Amino acid sequence: MRAPTGEQYSLRFEGDGAVVTGIVTQVAAGIRALEVGGIALVESFPEASTPPGAAGIVLVPWPNRVAGGVWELAGKTQQLDITEPKQGNAIHGLLRSTGYRLIEREPHRVVQGATVFPQHGYPFLLETTFEHRLEADGMTVTHTILNESEQAAPVAVGAHPYLRVGDVPVGELTLTIDARTRFLTDEKQIPVSEEEVAGTDFDLTQGRRVGGLAIDHGFGGVTVGADGCSVQRLEAPDGRAVELWADENFGFVQVFTPTNFAAPDGPRQAVAIEPMTAPANALNSGQGLRWLRPGERWELSWGIRYRAA
């Protein structure tokens, strides 16, 4: 029987160090598994399942939510399909259930593509490609977005990985988010303001134990280092760690620590660290939103890497 996430692309990289393996899905170009030397870096799920909590999927042409699925384009109201009925929002873009087409495949990498066609509330044509490439310490994901419309198109990009450090219980891990602000939201999880995290319970710059956190918030003011990348970290008590890095295009990050993640061994806590080029509701606020000119191409990258103790 065919998997609900389509084709499963098993990847393998053998360098001078540990063997790195991963599984990327056809549907939503998702990461279903990633290991370095047998140490799991992401929450995996069975081949016969859909991604629990949107685990590992690509979020295009917007991450997170659009309030009521409504936004304005040149003074005209646009109504997106409501894909989060409980809150009445449009969530996680337009490719969540799309089966991507295979473009290139090698033992350590796969490139897939998908088209965003004009549709309810988004009258633009985008051509997208996503490369998942294994390296000695983990995986690099490279997105390319091409606007094939005859008008400028608003675009934001995100991804939804849940990270882990092998078999260490998630509650025992220390989460460090190098960001200066967080977004306060209303009852429908739509941002209403942005505040400095310094001096608040949401300051994660010095690290906080995941077991004591209950977070589903976007963060801004992400620190970009001299290498042009930001780094968020999840560390085990023995010093082993998994890092999510992103290039300078990703100025925002969503942190989600559900206690009922549908893991294969039963519901438990998990932690998603989601790189985003714009925060929730960017089609309305404009914050972080990029308007691609007709024929303009945008390339950006992020990745997950393992750090030994």
Image (cartoon, rainbow, N blue to C red):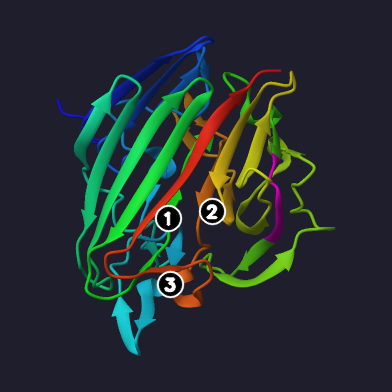
Callout 3 secondary element: helix
Callout 1 secondary element: loop
Q: Earlier in the sequence, mark 2 or mark 3?
A: 2
On whether residue 158 falls in the magenta region, the answer is no
Q: Identify the residue at image location x=35%, y=25%.
A: 23
Callout 2 secondary element: loop
Give x and y (percent) for residue 15: 47, 12
Gap in Å between the C-alphas at discs 1 and 2?
A: 8 Å
Q: Earlier in the sequence, mark 1 or mark 3?
A: 1
For disc 3, the marked residue is 283
| In the rendered image, the vertical position of residue 59 relative to residue 102, given as above or below | below
Q: Which amino acid lies under the numbered mark 2 shown in the image of this protein?
A: Phe
Compare residues 287 and 200 and report the one nearer the observer: 287
Look at the image and give the residue range highlighted in magenta. 176-181
Q: Is residue 11 something one can see in this rendering?
A: yes
Compare residues 240 and 136 and report the one nearer the observer: 136
Give x and y (percent) for residue 10: 31, 21
Q: Identify the residue at image location x=31%, y=50%.
A: 96
Compare residues 265 and 238 and report the one nearer the observer: 238
Q: Earlier in the sequence, mark 1 or mark 2?
A: 1
Quarter of the image where one finds residue 213: top right
For disc 1, the marked residue is 157
* Pointer 1 with pointer 2, Cβ within 8 A: yes
How would you classify the magenta stretch by its main secondary structure?
strand
Per the rendering, the mark at residue 250 is 2
